[in-house]
Image (cartoon, helix red, strand yellow):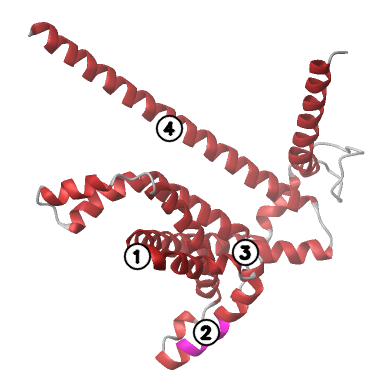
Amino acid sequence: MTARAITRLMVGFYLVLFFAYLFGPLVIMSITAFNTSSYPAVVPFEGFTLKWFEILFRDKDMMIGLQNSLRIGVLVVLISVPCGLAGALVMQQVYARARSFYYLVVVSPVLTPGVIIGISTVIFWKDFSAATGTGFLYDGIILAALGQSSFISAYCMLIFLSRLQRFDRALEEAGLDLGASNVQVFWHILIPYLRPAVLSAAVMAFLSSFENYNTTTFAVLADKTLTTVLAGRVRQGSTPAISALAVSIIAITVAGTIVYELVKRREDARKAAELRTAQAAEQRELAAA
């Protein structure tokens, strides 16, 4: 056996091991969601059933937790994306000497343990709402969204910074020279350029909020989210209904990815057709000249 064959064999073995480690738990959980066994098990496979999905959708606590997680996720997106964009724009404007200190300050929540963020969020907003008479802020859903946004906005800022590093500032200067205001330059030049980053930051913020546990479990007060409900259920003993939930989430994720890819390919095809049309028109004009 040659050295090249041994290398290929080792690489193939590593890839099989890697994908088995990555997708093995998902496959096992998917099988247990359709097994009639009352305990999550792959073997023996007692029979195919969909009852665990029915039990899942009839679970009141699970559905309430899911609704709260969706609400918190939407609030986190509405807070984190604008804050992250503002932080990235300020980062581009501050003096070079102060940039390192500013970066350290705005990224520090990422390095802070979620337990500390959750507790400090509750303490701060409790005193703030009592002092200002804004008692509606001291609500589990709002507190969880505020606590999560304090560090998720830093992730959003990093996404915007990576996009802004490739932005040509001459486009803004050209817009201002042509008579556009700063607001018009922002909405008609900068925002269209940052649209992919905005979408990426929004998806990342929602997913980070949806799966967060450490901060949420302290900031959510008496309310429940999907992660806190799942944590309580796992302590009592796992059931195939949890596997059914995992399969549902995986199916939604895969479906969303497929839809996004189809829309993206259709948009790329449309842009390519417009480019070909423009090139053909240009060639006709040159030929006529």
What span is colored magenta in the figure?
122-128
Q: CA distance from mark 1 to mark 2?
A: 31 Å
Label 1 neighbourhood size at 10 Å, few (<14), some (14-19), many (20+)?
few
Q: Is residue 158 left or right of residue 253?
A: left
Q: Given the image, on which type of amino acid does mark 4 rest?
A: Lys
Q: Given the image, on which type of amino acid does mark 1 rest?
A: Tyr
Name the residue beneath numbered marker 4. 264
Return the disc, 4 or 2, that comes first in the chain's sequence. 2
Of 124 and 159, nearer the camera is: 159
Q: CA distance from mark 4 to mark 1?
A: 38 Å
Q: Nearer the viewer, mark 3 or mark 2?
A: 2
Q: Given the image, on which type of amino acid does mark 3 rest?
A: Gly
Vertical position of residue 190 compared to residue 3: above or below: below
Return the disc, 1 or 2, that comes first in the chain's sequence. 1
Label 4 neighbourhood size at 10 Å, few (<14), some (14-19), many (20+)?
few
Is residue 223 at least partly visible in the picture?
yes
Residue lying at the far right of the rendered structure:
44
State yes or no: residue 16 in magenta: no
**Magenta stretch: dominant SS?**
helix
Give me the disc on residue 65: 3
Secondary structure of the residue carrying tag 1 is loop
